[in-house]
Image: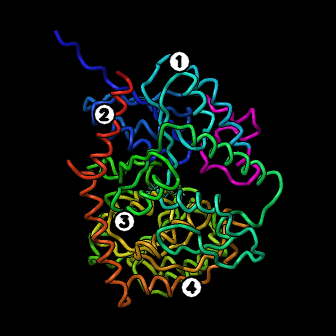
Amino acid sequence: MASKPHQLHIYFFPMMAHGHMIPMVDMAKLFSGHGVKATIITTPLNAPLISKTIDMDTELGSNISIRVIKFSSLEVGLPEGCENLSSVTSPEMIVKFYKATYMLQEPFEQLLREDSPDCLVADMYFPWATELASKLGIPKLVFHGTGVFPLCVHHSLVHHKPFKNIESDSEPVIVPGLPDTIKMTRRELSDHNREGETQNYIATLFQEIMKAELTSYGVLVNSFHELEPAYSEYYREVVGRKAWHIGPVSLFNRDNELKGKRGNKSSIDEEECLNWLDSKKPKSVLYVCFGSLADFSAAQLLEIAKGLEASEQQFIWVVRKEKEEKEEWLPEGFEKRIEGKGLIIRGWAPQVLILENEAVGGFVTHCGWNSLLEGVTAGVPMVTWPLFVDQFANEKFVTDVLRIGVRVGAQGWSRWAEDNKGSVRKEDIEMAVTQLMVSAEAEIMRNRARALKEKARRAVEDGGSSYSDLNALLEELRSIRS
Ligand code: UDP
């Protein structure tokens, strides 16, 4: 009698940040939908964010679960309960947070030894996981939480060092060797305002990340081949990495309930939000959201409010703030004036649900990879307002490669509120928004975005590029196992 085939068991271990947990949980659900036993590793306070999104899958019979390991916040000097990058509020806290991630090694090794999974998908922020996996003979795939384009930009900059002889922080320099002419300035590449211990620590961490990547089995990407074909080839041929494109993974949340459950709990009743959108004409609403980490000063928020009002567009604006009695970031009488025309969500928005609504015609985004991809998947053109990390490279991708975006004019890294005291002016915002929503060019960008939306959807269907990449990977993992 033939024995039952072995069920592949894969560990998914995302960095404790929404931009990494959300796509990796979607990935785990995708794999479990293909017959894999999926285990997600996280810390106690992040576990409830994940369990609410996978409960439905487990009820439907998917083999997906969570294992929890302790996060040593107090031991490294972080406040109790600080287990997610979204609660980190200063450069000093970031370093402590990274130090605490190194303390996950021991309990994680214990889990690996208990479960002996067939594969480990681990976040790039856990470079130590590569050595651990190889010690235990488990193939490890890296997940960066970003696309292949920014990885190619990063690779070229590290190898060619085009800034070596450049004095100025604001002089645009061509990123050598890429399929398109991409120019970047030094201040788009790092926290040029800061030097010292924090920067040194982060630089060392990134060296370890790059080293770990060289010995990993490959790279798992939340993207699809048709979005960045020239860069997929460059990544394989020039950078020399084996990568599987299996996205856009947000598409695997098929119904509204699941789409609304990703990440934090929504700060608005989803039905109320969708009813509001449904009362608007198609493509008439601008969605403004800067992801889960952005830290704006009151002065910068004030400029945004004024710019939105001056643009005369309808909008949904997500602000990472609780309702306060005195809100210095809002112009006098603003909410009264925008009643019916604008909606402010303080806290967390059901982003994918909003983007997919017919009424949304534009997206002001910080260019986090997930937001970028969710915008593409919804066929919505963007105003690009990068803040830090890969977001400036992603901006070039949206505006210069895909040509579905308008720059707001952000000049350099702006990680903390103190870095952005209103440097992007009301006039810049008004101009970019008007160009995106109502110019002659707007329709052309919208058509390009619509074409990408179709390609994204085809990629994940039976026989599409992401579907095939996933099957090829599973096949390979099964053959390694046998
Ligand atoms: N997100 C959301 N609602 C919000 C803010 C963010 O659903 O109010 C989700 C968004 O859909 C995306 C993720 O959080 O999936 C943010 O990831 P991204 O890479 O765009 O930015 P980051 O937060 O990492 O800067």
Task: Kindly identify the amino acid type of the residue bearing the numbered disc 4.
Answer: Asp
Residue 428's label in the rendered image is 4
Instruction: Tell me if residue 264 comes above or below residue 157 in the rendering.
Output: above
Q: Nearer the viewer, residue 433 or 312?
A: 433
First in residue order: circle 3 vs circle 1: 1
Separation (CA) of disc 2 from disc 1: 24 Å
Most distant residue in the right direction: 196
3 vs 2, front mark: 2
Task: Kindly identify the amino acid type of the residue bearing the numbered disc 1.
Answer: Arg
Separation (CA) of disc 3 from disc 2: 29 Å
4 vs 3, front mark: 3
Residue 92's label in the rendered image is none
2 vs 1, front mark: 2
Task: Kindly identify the amino acid type of the residue bearing the numbered disc 3.
Answer: Val
- Provide the residue designation for mark 2: 475
Query: What is the quadrant of residue 65 in the picture?
Result: top left
Query: What is the quadrant of residue 323 in the picture?
Result: bottom right
Q: Residue at x 39, y 65 (%)?
A: 375
Q: Nearer the viewer, residue 448 or 62?
A: 448
**Lateral position of residue 447 relative to residue 389, left or right:** left
Q: Residue at x 35, y 71 (%)?
A: 380
Q: Which residues are magenta?
A: 70-95
- Provide the residue designation for mark 1: 113
First in residue order: circle 2 vs circle 1: 1
Q: Nearer the viewer, residue 39 or 327?
A: 39
